[in-house]
Amino acid sequence: MKFKKLLPLLLIISAIILAYVFELHRFLSYASLKEHHEMLKAWTQAHLLLSILTVAGIYIVVVALSLPVATSITLFSGYLFGTFLGGTVVIVSASIGACIIFLVVRYALADWIAGRSHQWLKKLEQGFQENAFNYLLFLRLVPLFPFWVVNVAPALLNMRLRSYFVATFFGIIPGSLVYTALGNSLNALLAEDKTPDIGIIFQPNVFVPLLLLGLLALVPVLYRKLKH
């Protein structure tokens, strides 16, 4: 395995380590954003386009580095820009960030993956390739697995970038809008010094529709299996 190919992945890993060592993610935590929310709101109103680009840039980096603050930024995107504009910023940025880490992992580990001859890996890769879009769409719609795991696994299983991007983009729309809608209601929560319930996505009235959407994405997979 050539060092040149590993370099992008090593840089990503180094950036993640540095972010944790210096606790940079705490500056993007809900507590930090809550402390400065009035200033951020005023600055956003005065510089809307620059605010959108700034939040988008931060979100892309956070997703690419798998830092545990994406939910907090999603909330404040909803708070600063409203449910739908904030949701659009999140969906586009998260999709771009996911594609960056996807490409880095694929580029760095492509030779190593190709050199693996384990039968179980070949079967897994074949199965995923046949229904990659539907599987990934299910994983994006139903938030049961860490986002970073779902970002990396398709790269290891040789999924096409275009299918990966489309499944990611559409798959994260419902969950993103749930959180930006919650963020849009932060005015009242902040006024009462309350903390938003980030577990809202697992409440039955939210999770069950997401699960049903995810299962709907698997219908073509089931149809293909029954057809054969």
Image (spheres, helix red, strand yellow):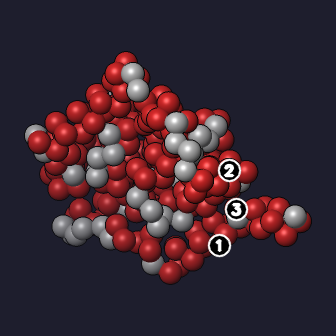
Position of residue 192 measured from the top left corner of the image (x, y, whole percent): 21, 69
**Residue annotated with mark 1:** 212
Q: Nearer the viewer, mark 2 or mark 1?
A: 2
Looking at the image, can residue 27 be seen?
Answer: no
* Foreground pick, 176 / 169: 169
Query: Residue 217's mark?
Result: 3
Q: Is residue 61 left or right of residue 206?
A: left
Q: Could you tell me how far apart the alpha carbons at marks 3 and 2 are, in whole angstroms? A: 19 Å
Query: Residue 174's mark?
Result: none
Position of residue 3 measured from the top left corner of the image (x, y, whole percent): 34, 21
Q: Of the residues shown, which amino acid type is indicated by label 3?
A: Ala
- Quadrant assignment for the N terminus: top left
Q: Residue at x 62, y 50 (%)?
A: 122
Q: Residue at x 77, y 67 (%)?
A: 222
Tag 3 near tag 2, CB within 8 Å = no
Number of numbered labels in the structure image: 3
Q: Residue at x 66, y 41 (%)?
A: 163
Q: Nearer the viewer, mark 3 or mark 2?
A: 2
Q: Nearer the viewer, mark 1 or mark 3?
A: 3
Q: Residues within 10 Å of mark 3 (few under 14, many from 20)?
A: many
* Foreground pick, 222 / 34: 222
Name above or below for residue 186 compared with residue 8: below
Q: Is residue 142 left or right of residue 15?
A: right
